[in-house]
Amino acid sequence: MRVLLIGRGGREHALAWKLCQTAQHVFVVPGNGGTAAMAPNVSNVEHADMHDFQSLVALARTLAVDLVLPGPDDVVVEGIADVFEQAGIPCFAPSKAAAKLEGSKTFAKDFMRRYDIPTAEYRNFDTYEHARDYLSSINHRVVIKVSGLAAGKGVVLPETQGKAQRELREMMVDKKFGHQEVVIEEFLSGDEISILTFSDGHTFRSLPPVQDHKRIFNGSEGPNTGGMGVYGPVDFVSRELMAQMEKDIIVPTFQGLRSDAHVFRGILFTGVMITPKGPKALEYNVRFGDPETQSLIPLLDTSTNLADICMSCTNGTLSSQVLGIRQGYACNVVIASEGYPGEHRQGDRIDIAAGPEDIQIFHAGTVRLGDELRTAGGRVFAVAAVRASLAEAVHAAYEGVSCIAFEGMQYRSDIASRCLTTSDEKRDEGHTA
């Protein structure tokens, strides 16, 4: 199979790493410094514009690809699947109508309410004055989310009324994230997890639940990011709890979309909070998560052909596919540039020393300039390892991190510490965006 993979981040490097094990060739648009030099059957197509869908159709025909796999949220939400469907080329992504689950948080919250999917109490606002007055009328802690896409940073968890009002003004008046519509919802306490589920419109298969670390600093301090590290499977999610979440959240989501005539084909990412009152849906993404993918893909065993699974989701044959999961645990640690998630450094030279065996260094914001590798983004690497125990996986991932050096690099040193201690204290990793 020949695959056109769209994106430039760590997620795409991880997908290319797995795809190239079985695919004839993987073409990455535009790719990064990692995909540029990973295998003979992987090529970057740097000149292509991943937002010019008609040009991508022409490229796919020129390259005679069998499957298109888009990674970034904006590409999926903008409707790339519809364009390739019209061109008769299989594309592993939901329709633009179904992708609205991620493109609009106000739409997603109303969808949850309409189909009785457990979620936090909320109100949607498109005018600042109404939102301001509502905030002033309540005395409980809230979460404020910008409705549109915001690269994982459009959610704030203010601890006081004053902070909430300041954050609201920045979102709706100053348009900090370029959108005005917001969701204000009740703050939920508990453990947040991510569930990624393949779907062909009839059959669905979920990957093991994992946990991301959204804040930039240790101890869940600082602003939200796109994600600073993921581990899994999470032991506090039993088989019974997983079955409950599929019954109460995943299945009603797919059924609701079918009822709305928006059959979902692709991968659904559901953020869930495990609260004292049971699991509640936080939000949806409609593509592979980043950095969840960098832990989940290495957990797929050698019997799993990722290209075939993605293709089966486009043609309704997922039930015939093998989705095998390795024994053990995966952990990835994200390394970012100084200043991220705000204005950050880039262009710094990167040195990578030899590391432990079976460590995957997935590139995100990197570029090759001649013989040198340099930083070219906020999140630069995700270093992943799979081991028999979680402690071993975490240790190995950090061993890999120690092999990388560039000016201003930053990373969290407490990934998975929540599950490596005997403390019962709950860590608030915030809501994703």
Image: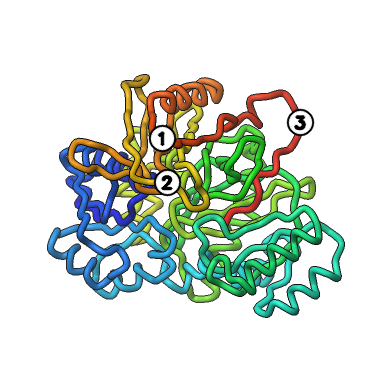
Q: Nearer the viewer, residue 242 or 98?
A: 98
Q: Quadrant of residue 123?
A: bottom right
Q: Which numbered disc covers residue 345?
A: 2
Dot in front, 3 or 2: 2
Q: Quote the CA–CA distance across marks 3 and 2.
A: 38 Å
Judging by the rendered image, the residue that carries numbered circle 3 is 424
Q: Residue at x 41, y 35 (%)?
A: 407
- The reply to whether discs 2 and 1 touch (Cβ–Cβ < 8 Å) is yes
Q: Residue at x 56, y 59 (%)?
A: 284
Residue drawn at x 33%, y 44% as measured from the top left: 347
The three-letter code of the residue at mark 3 reads Asp
| Residue bearing the label numbered 1 | 407
Q: Residue at x 47, y 44 (%)?
A: 291
Left or right of 421 on screen, residue 147: left
Instruction: Report if the CB atoms under discs 3 and 2 are less than 8 Å apart.
Output: no
Choose between 77 and 407: the one closer to the eye: 407
Whichever of labels 3 and 2 marks the residue nearer the N terminus, that label is 2
The answer, for residue 257, to whether it is visible in the render is no
Residue kind at label 2, given as amino acid type: Arg
Instruction: Kindly identify which numbered label has been placed on residue 339.
Output: none
Badge 2 marks a residue whose secondary structure is loop
Does residue 78 appear anywhere in the picture?
A: yes
Q: Residues within 10 Å of mark 1 (few under 14, many from 20)?
A: some
